[in-house]
Amino acid sequence: MKISVGSDERTPLTDDIVAALKKRGHEVSLHGPLAGGDQEWAEVGETLGREVASGQTEHGVLFCWTGTGASIAANKVTGVRAALCGDAETARGARRWNRANVLVMSLRATSPPLGIEILDAYLEEPPEADDFDRRNLARITALESAED
């Protein structure tokens, strides 16, 4: 699977996540300082979001200090469902019920071992929306269309 990874800062967490993805056989597309650039969180979130929304990559993993700013930036891109996850269960739910396609983590609050646990939960969980979730996902898609 091809996965975009972006951050406004390179840290042990980002290095461990990139290494874990590569070890698991994923092709990784890097953004921001992870790719040697100096982009800030809003630009990294937008760039990564556009790559995921266009289908160039299947998923994204995004970081910033709190995770909030990068989430907001990525979610401004139509078709992106970025979920800020601080634990594995939230990541599972984001995939299963919300069909998140971008996993976001806080550089401040996420240790490398916890980050790997969150990543694994996100990647292993299949999207399985029931009728309730499908109705809500359709409403989100309609909201995006109304704003275009």
Image: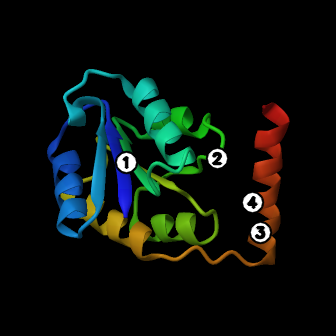
Instruction: Kindly state the secondary structure of the residue where label 2 is placed.
Output: loop
Using the image as rendered, state which of residue 25 and residue 94 is in the foreground: 25
Residue type of the residue flagged with mark 1: Ser
Instruction: Kindly state the secondary structure of the residue where label 3 is placed.
Output: helix
Q: Quadrant of the C terminus?
A: top right
Are dots 4 and 3 in contact, CB under 8 Å? yes
Disc 2: which residue = 79
Image coordinates for residue 90, horizontal then vertical, percent: 49, 65
Residue type of the residue flagged with mark 4: Leu
Of the image marks 1 and 4, the number of the one nearer the N terminus: 1
Using the image as rendered, state which of residue 80 and residue 2 is in the foreground: 2
Of the image marks 2 and 3, the number of the one nearer the N terminus: 2
Disc 1: which residue = 4
Of the image marks 1 and 2, the number of the one nearer the N terminus: 1
- How far separated are the C-alphas under marks 4 and 3? 5 Å
Q: Residue at x 53, y 32 (%)?
A: 73
Q: Which mark is residue 122?
A: none
Q: Residue at x 54, y 67 (%)?
A: 95
Q: Characterize the local packing of mark 2: few (<14), some (14-19) or many (20 or more) Cα atoms within 10 angstroms.
A: many
Are dots 2 and 4 in contact, CB under 8 Å? no
Please identify, in this view, whether the residue under mark 2 or under mark 3 is nearer the observer: 2
Q: Quadrant of the N terminus?
A: bottom left
Of the image marks 3 and 1, the number of the one nearer the N terminus: 1
Q: Is residue 71 above or below residue 127?
A: above
The reply to whether residue 71 is in sight is: no
Residue type of the residue flagged with mark 3: Arg
Please identify, in this view, whether the residue under mark 3 or under mark 1 is nearer the observer: 1
Disc 3: which residue = 134
Please identify, in this view, whether the residue under mark 2 or under mark 4 is nearer the observer: 2
Disc 4: which residue = 137
- How far separated are the C-alphas under marks 1 and 2? 15 Å
